[in-house]
Amino acid sequence: MSGTWIAIGVMTLLALGAGLLLAGDARRVWTLFASALVFALAGYAWQGSPGQPGSPRQMVVDVSPTSETLIDARRAFYNVEGIMPSRFVVTADGFSRRGQHRDAAGLLRNGVNENPQDGEAWLALALALTEQTRGQVTPAVGFAFERARATSPGNPAPGYFRGIVAMRSGALAEAREFWAQALAESDEDALGREYVAQQLERLDGVMRVLSESERTPAPTMPPPEAAPAP
């Protein structure tokens, strides 16, 4: 039952986040962000209950439904005018869009070896590895996220996407911690900071609803009436 409430909660979060598509001049940026959240949470809803009867395990494929949208959203966080991603990131993104995450990760390793201070390359590597492991946070994934955070000072992107990875596995409390940390460490004028703050507020609301639902006792059936005496 709790799994059902989590699915309902995250879908509520998506519905609330859709309002950001009306954001003035930043419409395109916010659309990318909202789309990333949609597909990330859809990925959880798709894979989050493999133990349910009739679960179509044979339908799981290597190409993640989140790849292309997450790439576009990642770019939006780093899309500073006049600054383009490295050639390794551009080429790796092409592989990731086709579901070739292993090849993408290999290229990105070359990229961070050449420039260890490339924060976007580290984040792209973290996401490629996450897709390769189907959402499992291996030591390599964790290391790449930490390096992305260290080399992207003031940018909320590493914490935001780390939270999405947690949310895909249903770990809403862990996702909240990452988002709160991303806000605390980001610059006041950082691109995407306002969006992350709004998503954190909505996530808090969803978690409150889930908490209240878990405290509500299930309805009990009334005792059967006594049969009339003959």
Image (cartoon, grey):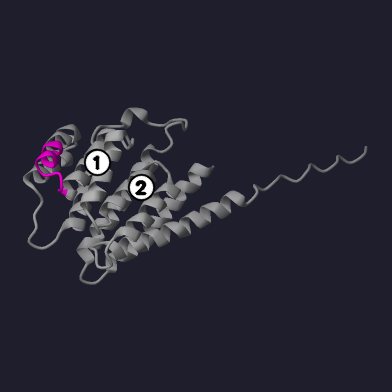
Query: Going 75% across and 46% down the picture, which residue do you hit?
Result: 222
Query: How many numbered marks does the figure carry?
Result: 2
The image quarter containing residue 114 is top left
Query: Going 21% across and 61% down the picture, which residue do you hit?
Result: 29
Q: Which mark is residue 155?
A: none
Residue matched to label 2: 41
User: Predominant secondary structure in magenta?
Assistant: helix
Q: Quadrant of the N terminus?
A: top right
Task: Mark 2: give few (<14), some (14-19) or many (20+) Cα within 10 Å.
Answer: many
Residue matched to label 1: 144
Residue 66 visible to an observer of this rendering? no
For label 1, the SS is helix
Q: Is residue 114 magenta?
A: yes
For label 2, the SS is helix
Q: Quadrant of the C terminus?
A: top right
Q: Is residue 94 magenta?
A: no
Mark 1 residue type = Ala
* Residue 99 falls left or right of residue 7: left
Tell me the distance, in whole angstroms, between the alpha carbons under discs 1 and 2. Answer: 22 Å
For discs 1 and 2, the disc positioned in front in the rendered view? 1
* Residue 29 falls left or right of residue 162: left
- Report the magenta residues as a range: 108-118
